[in-house]
Image (tube, rainbow, N blue to C red):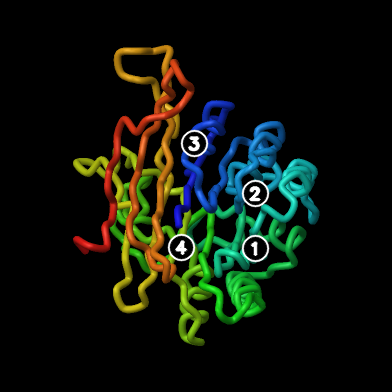
Amino acid sequence: MLIACVGDVHGLWNRESEEALSWLQPDLSLFVGDFGEEDVELVAEVARVPERKAVILGNHDAWYSASPTRRGNSVALDGVEEQLDILGDDHVGLSAKTLPDLGLSVVGCRPFSKGGGDWKRFSKFYRQLYGLRNFDDSATQIVGNSFAEPEHHRLIFLGHNGPTGLGSSADSPCGLDFRPEEGDFGDRDMEDAIRAVLEKGRRVPLAVFGHMHERLHRFALPRTSRRMFHLDKSSGVAYVNCAVVPRIREAEGDPKATQHNFVLVTMTAALEVERVESVWLQKNQGDGSFERVETTEWYNRESG
């Protein structure tokens, strides 16, 4: 089974991106959000993608609505609610998508996450939109949604940001790299939910997220690239950060051609992660097909 993961978009999604995704013929596509600053038109383009997909919106998708500078007890949510309406059931934030033919379910974590441990800054936004008071409320809802899925299903967790617990150095999958001090900038509610679900015997082969970009801030020098994959050997959970940003680049030597990034997760028949690759695709102008112009292997089960 092939899962195509689309990292933080930040405005870089177009007709050719959609064609590249179709060429891959994935069984499932996962979008981790940050399409734009409440860019409703771009979200509508993604919603029209015919491939089976699950989407979670990111902090940039609530750029104005969740601004902590807004005054008063209520938050204007028009832009956020319009995006949610457009995506419909494909948006899995604090919900789940059941895929019976694949034998798995996608469990959405807290959408619009900015990362880190500051709940107060966005408390009005989450209380008004989801009735959440704190991280514990969020974790409880994620866990409840998980157990509502068929018992025999494998669970894939999808977040905009990833969980805490994957390291506290700047180059960790969710490591703080944009301040001089380093630390774990993951989402505690996501870690708590995954742990609770595992403790009850459910199988979680994969967690996919973005937000923390592969290219590190200058504060992290001399390190320049983030570690984008982590395998928890005790639980079997493969954690994949697919935020390769920007996800569209010019082709070397041909400024008119562009290349599109996807992170591909190959699963075994037993729904275990077999291989994870970051690939760049370029369109062949002759027949309209695509070719892999660059592949970086992040994980291969055979080589460990």
Disc marking residue 261 = none
Q: Residues within 10 Å of mark 1 (few under 14, many from 20)?
A: many
Q: Secondary structure at mark 1?
A: strand
How far apart are the alpha carbons under marks 2 and 4? 29 Å
How far apart are the alpha carbons under marks 1 and 2? 31 Å
Closest to the observer, 137 or 97: 97
- At label 4, which amino acid type do we have? Ala
Mark closer to the chain start, 2 or 4: 2
Q: Are marks 2 and 4 in contact (CB under 8 Å)?
A: no
Q: Are marks 2 and 3 in contact (CB under 8 Å)?
A: no
Task: Tell whether 237 sits left or right of 192.
Answer: left
Mark closer to the chain start, 4 or 1: 1
How far apart are the alpha carbons under marks 4 and 1? 14 Å
Q: Please name the residue that numbered disc 2 is placed on.
A: 68
Report x, y in % for residue 246: 43, 33
Report x, y in % for residue 148: 66, 78
Q: Is residue 89 above or below residue 19?
A: below
Q: Please name the residue that numbered disc 3 is placed on.
A: 23
Q: Secondary structure at mark 2?
A: loop
Mark closer to the chain start, 3 or 1: 3
Q: Residues within 10 Å of mark 2 (few under 14, many from 20)?
A: some
Between circles 2 and 3, the one closer to the viewer is 3
- At label 2, which amino acid type do we have? Pro
Q: Please name the residue that numbered disc 1 is placed on.
A: 97
- Residue 106 image-quadrant placement: bottom right
Q: Are marks 1 and 2 in contact (CB under 8 Å)?
A: no
Closest to the observer, 199 or 72: 199
How far apart are the alpha carbons under marks 2 and 3? 41 Å
Q: Secondary structure at mark 3?
A: helix
Disc marking residue 207 = 4
- The residue that appears at 59% across and 38% down in the rendered structure is 35
Mark closer to the chain start, 3 or 4: 3
